[in-house]
Amino acid sequence: MTKTGAFPVLEIKGLDKFRGKTQVLHGIDLCVNAGERLALLGHNGAGKSTLIKAVLGLIQAEGGSIQICGARPGSAAARADTAFLPEAVSFHPALTGQEQLTMFDRLMGAGGDVSALLQRVGLGDAMQRRIDTYSKGMRQRLGLAQVLLGRPKLALLDEPTSGLDPISRQDLYAIIDELAAKGTAVLIASHALTEVEARTDRIAILRQGVKVADDTLDNLSRKAGLPVKLRLQTTGPDADQIARDTGGRRINGASVEIICAPQDKMAELRRIASMGDTVLDIDMQPPRLEDLYRYYSTQEEQG
Amino acid sequence: MRILAIYRAEMLILRRNLWIVMATLIMLAFALALSFAGSAPTGTLGVDMLTVSVASMTTLSVYLAPLLALMMGFDAISGDRDRGSLALLLSYPAGRAEILSGKFLAHLTALSIAMIIGFGAAGACAAWFGGAGTESLIALARLVLTSILLGAVFLMLGYCLSALAGSTTAAAGLSAGLWLVFVVLYDLALLGAVVMDSEGIFTQQLFPWVMVANPADAFRLWNIAASESVALTSGMAGAAASLPAWAAPLSLLLWPVLGFALARTAFQRLEP
């Protein structure tokens, strides 16, 4: 869902990147608007990290263009506007969290309130301790704190939830929502599909360096036309009969599972409703992001 | 400002890792030991004890200054890379030359502290027990300054290897090799060449220049050529005499600049 009047912060056009003779990115077009949260999904080696490094200006692409608020990646303006959270980041073990974040703050010239930021990510009690005493989740939080420095226009988060417990993940997405609400364009490269499902505005899927999908979750489901799963609970004796009538499959005693195309869903529901008392309950499962992801990331090359 | 941000963080790391304390203690122990062990020939040469002490410490510094510098410098870039924080650091507005400069200034500060305290204390002891003159005090000051310069050369070369090596372990290995080549093998090879050549063109014309091209030898020559009495006690007067006085200082001053250019080029090419 794009906010009205949002302008593109990150614009990637026709990006090609080679590693030796293999092409790892094929003409990628991608756009993230201010205040938008984009999930970038893909298997390991699909090109997510390569894409992020190209946006950071750490590697040079062979073709196409990248613009961050109109600036070239790696330029002073682009670096000042961009925040980055590397995958499984670690910091110098001898520094304390506060010292490390102070260094980043000075590099930004942000002059921010480092202690308040550390409080915000839940490291208030640990900020005077050396980083080698931190758990993986605490290091990740410290990494997140440096993302918040200096109000970035673009935030690139590479697997931000790796190593975090469920509560920390909730916190993390709350902070991401806050960033986006303040107008930061957020790009999240992730494997954690179920979290991304509820927490992002748009989803892009990379497969072997090719963008195979880029839309909202609803539109992607519609385009994929993945079947809806209906599960009926029956009184018992009639389960076999119902399974035969509906073309479904009887599972564990009194339940029947029906798989139908999205456009047939309402017709199917009306038919079931007319069956009367024998159907006790009905449970509907729309396709999940995982199904969609599997659909888009395994299908044959689109023409 | 950004150089200062890196510098301050690196100084904290050096202090907390006890690197400054360790380097200072190493310099202090070796300098004091050599000063006293080398004080025997004082009477026969007719120079004060501080002069003898400076000559022994010059020999010591040829080995120790590059070693300490390489030990500080070898993981400067590869360490960050191994931790995965290099890509993050490079996504900040600081340029690679600024990152390099910040780390260099911090490491150089630590080396300077170790050199000044180590050589200073040994020199003070020698002067107290065996006397010192203006000339020997200047020789001591020169020793401290040139040792810091020699350290600067090897800090830069260490960064260069750190950027080129695939990992911190590889960087450590390469650094040890570099030390061996510059400090030990280079001189051995030259010695071999002189013996083979026996008073030929190479020995007469080329040898002093090839020698002074090595920063470690330039350091030695500078300290020796500048002070007659130090040359006397170290027996290197011959090589020093055949070169113009500016050759050794020029080499030792050019090397840090060259080292920075090399380290920067290597760092620039690195894809984290």
Image (tube, grey):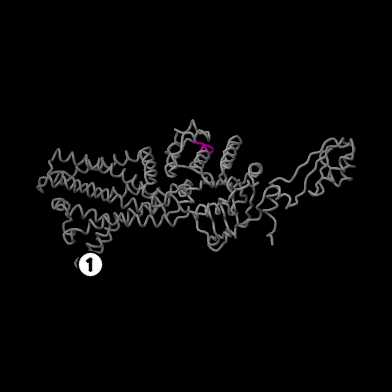
Badge 1 crowding class, 10 Å Cα cut-off, few under 14, some 14 to 19, many 20 or more, is: some
Toward the viewer: B45 or B110?
B110
User: Which percent across, then down, holds residue A228?
Assistant: 77, 46
Write down the region rendered in magenta: A134-139
Q: Residue at x 65, y 46 (%)?
A: A1
Element type where label 1 sits in the image: helix
Q: Position of residue A146 (x, y in %)?
A: 49, 41
Name which quarter of the figure residue A177 lies in: top right
Spot occupied by residue B68 in the image (x, y as percentages of width and height): 32, 46
Q: Nearer the viewer, residue B239 or A69?
A: A69
B259 or A275: nearer the eye? A275
| Residue that sits furthest to the bottom in the current view | B201
Dividing the picture into quadrants, the one containing residue B115 is top left
Against A169, residue B271 (above or below) is below
Q: Is residue A138 magenta?
A: yes
Find the residue positioned furthest to the top: A125
Quadrant including the C terminus of chain A: bottom right
Which chain letter goes with mark 1?
B
Prevailing SS of the magenta stretch: helix
Name the side, left or right, on which A67 lies relative to A261: left
Amino acid type indicated by mark 1: Phe
Q: Position of residue A201 (x, y in %)?
A: 64, 45
In the rendered structure, does residue A144 fall within the stretch colored magenta? no
Q: In the rendered view, does B16 fall on the left or right side of B221? A: right
Query: Where on the picture, by quarter, is residue A98?
Result: top left
Q: Which residue is mark 1?
A: B202
